[in-house]
């Protein structure tokens, strides 16, 4: 649950992990909504927190949203170990 992660951890402790893996389809909010919320937190820094979007499939609307949110790291399921390691 992305809302719970934001309210119970990120806002409470005022810090983000080095890597956040986000599934496009999540309960309560989409992966896009979650990423947008993360990017608006005062503790967010693109240099310090790498966001990886994961999805079983991406359509044209998703591609536009990825560009709009400037998401640099996208992996499709099933995850490929080599692709994942390249991102890290």
Image (cartoon, rainbow, N blue to C red):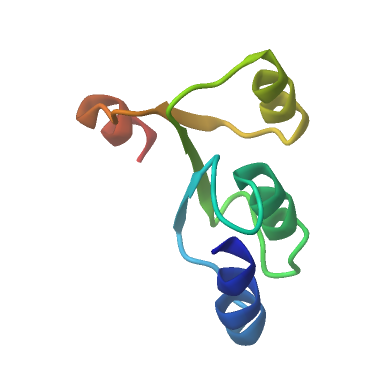
Indicate left or right for 53 with 14 as reference: left
- Marker count (numbered): 0
- Looking at the image, residue 20 lies above or below residue 53: below
Q: Residue at x 71, y 25 (%)?
A: 67
In the image as oriented, which residue stretches furthest toward the front? 27
Q: Residue at x 58, y 50 (%)?
A: 47
In the image as oriented, which residue stretches furthest toward the left? 81
Residue 62: percent from left, percent from top: 66, 24
Indicate left or right for 31 with 68 as reference: left
Quarter of the image for the N terminus: give it.
bottom right
In the image as oriented, which residue stretches furthest toward the bottom? 12
Query: Which of the pair 46/80 is nearer the observer?
Result: 80
Residue 53: percent from left, percent from top: 51, 38
Residue 49: percent from left, percent from top: 53, 55
Indicate left or right for 29 with 9 as reference: right
Quarter of the image for the C terminus: give it.
top left
- Looking at the image, residue 32 lies above or below residue 6: above
Query: Which of the pair 64/46 is nearer the observer?
Result: 64
Q: Residue at x 53, y 46 (%)?
A: 51
- Looking at the image, residue 68 lies above or below residue 30: above
Give residue 11's quadrant in the image: bottom right
Q: Residue at x 55, y 79 (%)?
A: 9
């Amino acid at each position: 649950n992305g809302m719970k992660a934001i309210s119970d951890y990120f806002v409470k402790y005022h810090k983000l992990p080095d890597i956040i893996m986000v599934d496009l389809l999540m309960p309560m909010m989409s992966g896009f909504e979650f990423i947008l919320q993360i990017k608006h937190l005062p503790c967010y820094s693109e240099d310090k927190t790498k966001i990886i979007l994961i999805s079983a499939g991406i359509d044209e609307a998703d591609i536009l949203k990825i560009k709009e949110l400037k998401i640099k790291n996208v992996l499709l399921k099933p995850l490929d170990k080599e692709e994942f390691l390249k991102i890290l």
